[in-house]
Amino acid sequence: MRRAACKTDATLSLSRPQECPSNQELQNSLRQVEKMLAAHEASYQQSLRSLRKKLSALQNSTRAISRKPKKLPANSRRLGRVFAIGHEVHFLCKPGYELIGPRTRVCLESLKWSGQQPMCRSESDCVCVCVCVCVCVCVCVCVCVSDIDECRLFPLGQPGRLCVHQCVNTPGSFHCLCPAGYDLARDARSCKDIDECESRRHNCTAEQVCVNTYGGFRCVTVECPRLKNATYIRTSPMRCERNPCMVGDRTCTQAPNSISFHFLPVVSNMSAPRVLFRVSAARVLGDTLRFGLAGGRGRGHFSVQRSGRQSGTLLLVTPVQGPATLEAEVEMSELEHNVLLGRYVTKVTMFVSPYEF
């Protein structure tokens, strides 16, 4: 029996009718589609497993280089969701609370956060209310919040310290103190030196020179030396020059042609090496200049180096714990064919403060 012709599109020729596929052909086509879908599904599952492995590895590596800050302080909120190295988080307190400690913390390469954990403290401290009864007797009722000692929370010598010198706790707050010779700076935490010489808050005599130091002042007297066969005259407040020598007086000609005085105030434990002073020759008559240390107290802390054709440099080579007073004598010798033409001495006195500020 002839199969019925399938319905054809209007564009097809009616003279060549198409036949419908057999059941066997349809089943073969369905099996091929099933195989193709199964292959696509297997490929998709494989890609999905690979993607999950990569995501897991990425999450593990992220955990390895980042750490969330510790528990969020009470009554606060944190700004910043990236906890990788170099990123910052910021802390804010709720209304009615003030922040104690660093407002911003940075994730360091050590996988730790900079500064100390901040906290939020209630702005209200002790609230006293007077209640009047009918007999006109006022009863004071106080509701107190336990005070936080900020000075103990952020002690000296630790990151985020509140005061440079001394911290004094007060109910609900704190304030900083500075040692004698210093004023509290505008930030209410640092200390700035008082220049007693400039403000005329010293007791130096007219013959003395007032030298301001960190935390105080010194009254120094500049005196020209008394050497055998050599006499000196003071040509400026900080300089003495030798009078002309008699012909043939070798002892006189070996004495320094001039002696200069310089006073340097420095803080305690100043980092070293550090340039303290430079000595230069205004003009050179000979063919050689030599620089060196001639003497002074504390020579182990100093060194002299050549810094130019006509200059030398006095260096501090080791830190000095104050209070202390050190001296160094820098000598510049001028020679012509190894014959001494003149010696010039600079006496440097260093006043080291007891404090590091």
Image (cartoon, rainbow, N blue to C red):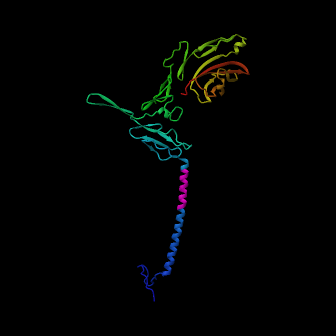
**Horizontal and vertical percent position of residue 122:** 40, 37
Query: Left or right: where does residue 281 sit relative to residue 207?
Result: right
Which secondary structure dominates the residues rendered in magenta?
helix
The reply to whether residue 97 is in sight is yes
**Horizontal and vertical percent position of residue 19:** 46, 83
Query: Left or right: where does residue 278 sit relative to residue 91?
Result: right
**Horizontal and vertical percent position of residue 17:** 44, 83
**Horizontal and vertical percent position of residue 208:** 55, 14
Q: 16 above or below 62?
A: below
Q: Quadrant of residue 295?
A: top right
Quarter of the image with the N terminus in it: bottom left
Q: 164 above or below 341?
A: below
The reply to whether residue 308 is in sight is no
Report the magenta residues as a range.
48-62
The front one of 344 and 11 is 344
Q: Quadrant of residue 305?
A: top right
Q: 64 above or below 188?
A: below
Q: Residue furthest front?
A: 135
Q: Quadrant of residue 277?
A: top right
The front one of 232 and 77 is 77
Q: Residue furthest left?
A: 134
Question: What residue is at 53 percent from the left and 58 percent from the top?
Answer: 52
Q: 80 above or below 163?
A: below
Residue 118 located within the stretch drawn in magenta:
no
The front one of 122 and 107 is 122
Residue 54 located within the stretch drawn in magenta:
yes
